Image: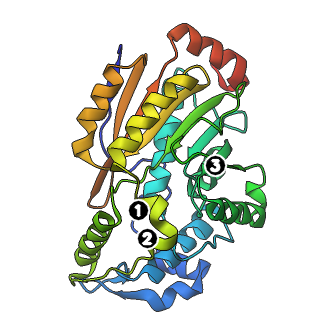
């Protein structure tokens, strides 16, 4: 372990939704959102965040208004990702590349990104493609999620170069989807962070209570289609632990590996895993949206000389001479 860097937590300056939502513009983009605007605790107009249908429409409106995505339909049993937080992960990964390239940001489809667990919504490839023109490959263990992501891709012309791959082994993150001679500039993942369905339901009840002030014995959540998105054996820590160990097999295939770490209590253990591995450097990048705090952990096995060769051979004009 040779280098560690921590950055300040904040909503990223390049985030298109950094400011208060422009409800009029969003309703213009998606009129169906209008009936879900209600007064908040202060009496100001707001989205009914306790209503899953309202949240879904809000994020559809954000994608249409800010990113030009006209068609973002996927099964209602799958998670609906909040656009601002997902965009922040993409922007911080862009900064990660920039920091490895003397402050110059590599853009365009020569930059290859791998999204582990693309999900039915295909959200990270959408944002990365629209914001930076990167080429994305999304993987998932669920054939239905792959089919949904591919439908979204085919429905939006600007996404036509995105690729999806089915992960045949649920225990693997990289094996079975990264080809032997394939090179990935950025690998990202939003891992399932609950160890059981019961734990996930408890978290959902807590979230709904915070949003609405009401208790719910049975949260409105269909686990039949969303279990793989929320739950894995051992929870978040176990998933990331396996990812770190497996990444060593592809140490020279990927410039930066990364994952979100939702639970602060898991961070020190993950740092210890990286400190005791063969990585050349890792970084912890705090993020925050609203009342939620999270962080990205990114690691690389490449030496400085290997990084220089990588920049020259794969980033072309994006790399500093």
Q: Is residue 155 above or below residue 26?
A: above
Check the image and report above or below for 175 versus 81. Answer: above
Percent across and percent down for residue 58 are 49, 75
Q: Is residue 43 above or below residue 321?
A: below
Structural distance between the alpha carbons of marks 1 and 2: 6 Å
Tell me what residue is drawn at x 42 percent, y 87 percent: 37
Q: Residue at x 59, y 74 (%)?
A: 75
Residue beneath the point at 69% across and 71% down = 70
SS of the residue under disc 1: loop
Can residue 246 be seen in the rendering of this structure? yes
In percent of width and height, residue 35 lies at 48, 92
Question: Residue 310 vs residue 257: left or right?
Answer: right
Q: Residues within 10 Å of mark 1 (few under 14, many from 20)?
A: few
Q: Are marks 1 and 2 in contact (CB under 8 Å)?
A: yes
Mark closer to the observer (3, 2)? 3
Quarter containing the C terminus:
top right
**Residue labelled with disc 3:** 138
- Residue that carries the numbered disc 2 in the rendered image: 21
| Residue 223, x across and y down, in percent | 44, 72
Q: Residue at x 68, y 16 (%)?
A: 312
Question: Of marks 3 and 2, which one's residue comes earlier in the chain?
Answer: 2
């Amino acid at each position: 372990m040779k280098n560690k860097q921590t950055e300040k937590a904040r909503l990223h300056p390049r985030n298109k939704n950094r400011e208060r939502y422009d409800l009029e513009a969003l309703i213009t983009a998606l009129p169906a959102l209008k009936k879900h605007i209600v007064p908040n605790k202060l009496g100001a107009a707001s989205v009914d965040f306790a209503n899953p249908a309202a949240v879904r429409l809000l994020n559809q409106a954000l994608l249409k208004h800010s990113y030009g995505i006209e068609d973002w339909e996927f099964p209602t049993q799958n998670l609906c990702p909040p656009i601002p937080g997902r965009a922040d992960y993409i922007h911080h990964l862009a900064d990660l590349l920039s920091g490895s390239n003397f402050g110059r940001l590599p853009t365009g489809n020569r930059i290859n990104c791998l999204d582990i667990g693309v999900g039915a919504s295909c959200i990270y490839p959408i944002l990365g493609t629209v914001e930076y023109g990167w080429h994305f490959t999304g993987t998932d263990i669920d054939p239905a999620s792959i089919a949904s992501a591919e439908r979204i891709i085919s429905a939006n012309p600007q996404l036509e170069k995105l690729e999806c791959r089915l992960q045949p082994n649920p225990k693997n993150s990289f094996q079975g989807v990264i080809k032997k001679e394939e090179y990935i500039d950025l690998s990202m993942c939003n891992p399932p962070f609950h160890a059981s369905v019961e734990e996930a339901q408890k978290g959902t009840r807590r979230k709904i209570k915070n949003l609405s002030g009401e208790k719910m014995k049975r949260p409105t959540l269909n686990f039949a289609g969303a279990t793989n998105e929320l739950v894995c054996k051992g929870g978040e820590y176990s998933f990331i632990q396996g990812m770190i160990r497996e990444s060593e097999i592809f140490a020279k295939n990927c410039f930066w590996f990364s994952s979100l770490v939702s639970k602060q209590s898991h961070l020190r253990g993950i740092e210890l895993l990286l400190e005791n591995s063969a990585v050349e450097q890792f970084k912890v990048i705090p993020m925050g949206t609203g009342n939620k705090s999270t962080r990205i952990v990114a690691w690389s096995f490449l030496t400085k000389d290997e990084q220089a060769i990588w920049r020259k051979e794969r980033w072309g004009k994006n790399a500093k001479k």
